[in-house]
Image (spheres, grey):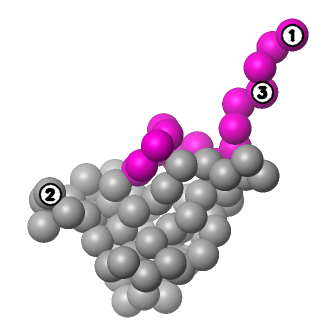
């Protein structure tokens, strides 16, 4: 399982939020760690915030972990 985590949190969308996929199933769009945990729980995986730091369970794809909004560029 280490090479293929069951939870994938995809890159930040242009409007904000990240798509969450659990075991190949799209669960929804998360705007916070709490949202990710809720979506993951709906798929039958439970755990606290520490779950999100476990690379054997969660892959943060295309961006920094725990970030849900695009950074604005300074003028």
Which residue occupies 36% across, 78% down? 24
Residue 32's quadrant in the figure?
Answer: bottom right
Determine the main secondary structure of the stretch shown in magenta.
loop
| Residue 37 picture location, percent across and down | 50, 71
Q: Is residue 61 magenta?
A: yes
Which mark, residue 75?
Answer: 1
Assign the N terminus to one quadrant of the image: bottom left
Which residue occupies 54% across, 49% down? 11
Q: Are marks 2 and 3 in contact (CB under 8 Å)?
A: no
| Residue 20 picture location, percent across and down | 51, 68
Element type where label 3 sits in the image = loop
In magenta, the rendered stretch is 60-75
Q: Are marks 3 and 1 in contact (CB under 8 Å)?
A: no
In the picture of the structure, the residue carrying the numbered disc 2 is 3
Residue 4's quadrant in the figure?
Answer: bottom left
Which residue occupies 38% across, 89% down? 44
Q: Is residue 70 magenta?
A: yes
Residue 34's quadrant in the figure?
Answer: bottom right
| Residue 33 picture location, percent across and down | 55, 59
Assign the C terminus to one quadrant of the image: top right
Question: How many C-alpha atoms fall within 10 Å of the one at disc 3: few (<14), some, or many (≥20)?
Answer: few
Residue most extreme to the top: 75
> Could you tell me how far apart the alpha carbons at marks 2 and 3 are, in whole angstroms?
33 Å
Q: Is residue 64 left or right of residue 13?
A: left
N-terminal-most mark, 1 or 2: 2
| Residue 43 picture location, percent across and down | 42, 87
> Could you tell me how far apart the alpha carbons at marks 3 and 1 are, in whole angstroms?
9 Å
- In this view, the residue in front, 16 or 14, is 14
Whether residue 53 is visible, yes or no, is yes
Which mark, residue 72?
Answer: 3
């Amino acid at each position: 399982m280490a090479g293929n985590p069951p939870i994938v949190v995809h890159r930040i969308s242009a409007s904000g939020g990240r798509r969450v996929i659990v075991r190949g199933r799209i669960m929804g769009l998360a705007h916070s760690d709490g949202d990710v945990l809720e979506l993951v729980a709906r798929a039958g995986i439970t755990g606290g915030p520490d779950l999100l730091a476990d690379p054997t369970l969660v892959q943060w794809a295309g961006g920094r972990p725990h970030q849900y909004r695009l950074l604005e560029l300074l003028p």
